[in-house]
Amino acid sequence: MTSLCIGFGFFGGIFAPALYVGAAGGALFSKLLILLGFSVSLPAMALAGTAAVGAVAIGAPVATTLIILEFTGSYEFAVAAMIAVQVSTFMSHRLYGDSLFDMALNDRGIKIGLGRQHVQMDDLPLTKILSNEAMTFPENTSIKEVSRKMTKNRATEAVIISNENKYKGKISIYDIIKSNINEKEQIVSLIDNSHLVLNYKISLVKSIEEASSFVGEFIPVKNFENNDYIGSINESDLFQAYLKLQSQVLNVEKDTKNWKKFK
């Protein structure tokens, strides 16, 4: 019933059912060994099965061994439980993960095994760290005007948008210098669409992955659904956000604030 309830998405505990399944499985296995002529202890096998399944379910091998020791008060049973726990934990870790709770979080897209810092990075939307320092020009602006303003502001790249704030593309000062087009022509004729553009919905960790091989002044960010221009982000924004989250994780896990005060 527990398997059916959890499988259908209902709420329910797994610790007590795991102990029951482990005890039943261990007792059944010992019965089979006895029928085959082996001399085994049914209580020891039942407790070993209880510990093996319970440790895998909650991801706490040491605590499960201590629970068996407290239940029985027997070091012999505790040793049998310890061996079963080590084998089951090793096999489940190699095949699935640390516990059923980790698997449930992974199914929801939360990679808890990668650590607190990765979880926070995956939870931080890109729109929270946009700097919007990129120069923007309407698509009907002349090449001469764009060149003049970019030279004045010492910018090497700029974003071209429509009058409705739709993203058109990105141009660089080098494209303007190399072009032989009349300076009175509109800047839209020099747009380069082979550059990296990020979706505003992605997280910090995804943006770092996509920008790992990026070279340039900034990365445009837009809405991929309606092509609206959202803003821009540069490499320093990503680095600063990463370092800020790293500092927060250290403050939480190691209490570095109070440690610095103590020093």
Image (tube, rainbow, N blue to C red):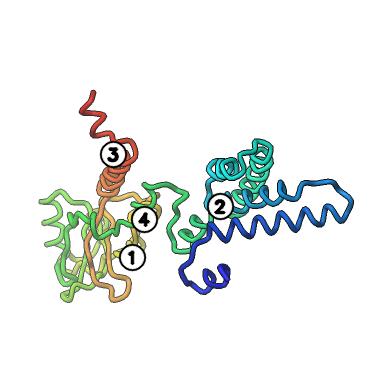
Pinpoint residue 119: horizontal percent, then vertical percent. Answer: 38, 52
Near-viewer residue (127 or 261): 261
Quadrant that contains the C terminus: top left
Q: Which residue is mark 4?
A: 122
Q: CA distance from mark 2 to mark 4?
A: 20 Å
Q: Looking at the picture, how far across and down is residue 100, in whole percent? A: 53, 57
- Disc 4 from disc 1: Cα separation: 28 Å
Residue 221 in which image quadrant? bottom left
Q: Which amino acid lies under the numbered mark 1 shown in the image of this protein?
A: Asn
For marks 1 and 3 on the same chain, the one whose residue lies earlier in the sequence: 1
Q: Amino acid at mark 4?
A: Asp
Tell me which numbered mark, 2 or 4, is placed earlier along the sequence: 2
Front of the two marks 2 and 1: 2
Three-letter amino acid code at the position of disc 3:
Asn
Q: Which residue is mark 3?
A: 251
Q: Position of residue 118 (x, y in %)?
A: 39, 49
Q: Quadrant of residue 124?
A: bottom left
Q: Position of residue 254 (x, y in %)?
A: 33, 36
The residue under the point 56% across, 52% down is 97
Determine the residue positioned at 23% across, 54% down. Answer: 129
What residue does disc 1 label? 193
